[in-house]
Image (tube, grey):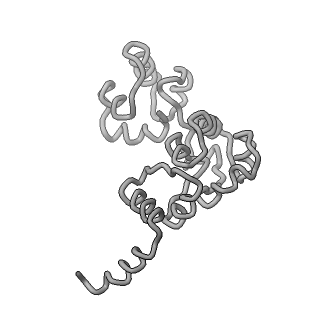
Amino acid sequence: MAHWLSPFRQVQQALNPSEQHVRQQLQQNPYYRLQSWAEIPIAADWGLRIEVNLAEVDDWLRLPGISIHQARSLVALTSSGGQLLCLDDLAAALSLPLARVQPLAPLLSFSYYDPEGLENPQRFNPNTTTLAELEQIPLLTERLAQRIFTERQTHGPYRDIADLQQRLAFSGYFTTQLMYYLRF
């Protein structure tokens, strides 16, 4: 064993077993769902951060105490242009007291995104959006928007971006550009 690893091993052994377990889970599975409030400081030290205004349902579900209903509600809010700028906003959006969301603070990042800015284009769910909304996507002609809409109506919802690409025979390049405007 290399001598430079010795200090690392000593520190690792000094950690309590539950902390070691959480660190190991985070290292092995970047999408690990935290099991308790006690894991929050460990995950924060590890570098886990969630940008609340860009978070997807799976991001919210990584946090202890957040239900699937709450996660979907938050994503629906931010997807429709609503923004959460502080813990108070998050608590209000969830209809919870501030004290209930306060423990999540070390993992949350609140940033403002200009709704008209290029870095934050409006995103549409191709499985629920109207044809008129699809036509708002800058990359789509009326014909392409109609193809996406008709394919969904005929063969059912798209599983993900890869399914959409395959079913519509879009090029990899076009799909890569389009994915910034879609949300599944």
Say which of 17 and 96 sits in front: 17
Q: In the displayed structure, does residue 130 sit left or right of residue 87?
A: left
Say which of 118 and 11 sits in front: 11
Image spot of residue 13 (x, y percent): 40, 75
* Above or below 17: residue 95: above
Q: In the displayed structure, does residue 47 sit left or right of residue 71?
A: left
Say which of 111 and 60 sits in front: 60
Name which residue lies at 50% across and 64% down: 47
Q: Quadrant of the N terminus?
A: bottom left
Image spot of residue 57 (x, y percent): 53, 40
Which residue sits furthest bottom?
3
Q: Classify residue 75 by image quadrant.
A: top right
Q: In the displayed structure, does residue 176 sit left or right of residue 96?
A: left
* Above or below 124: residue 97: below
Q: Classify residue 8 by image quadrant.
A: bottom left
Image spot of residue 11 (x, y percent): 42, 78
Say which of 50 and 158 sits in front: 50
Name which residue lies at 54% across and 21% down: 130
* Above or below 105: residue 71: above
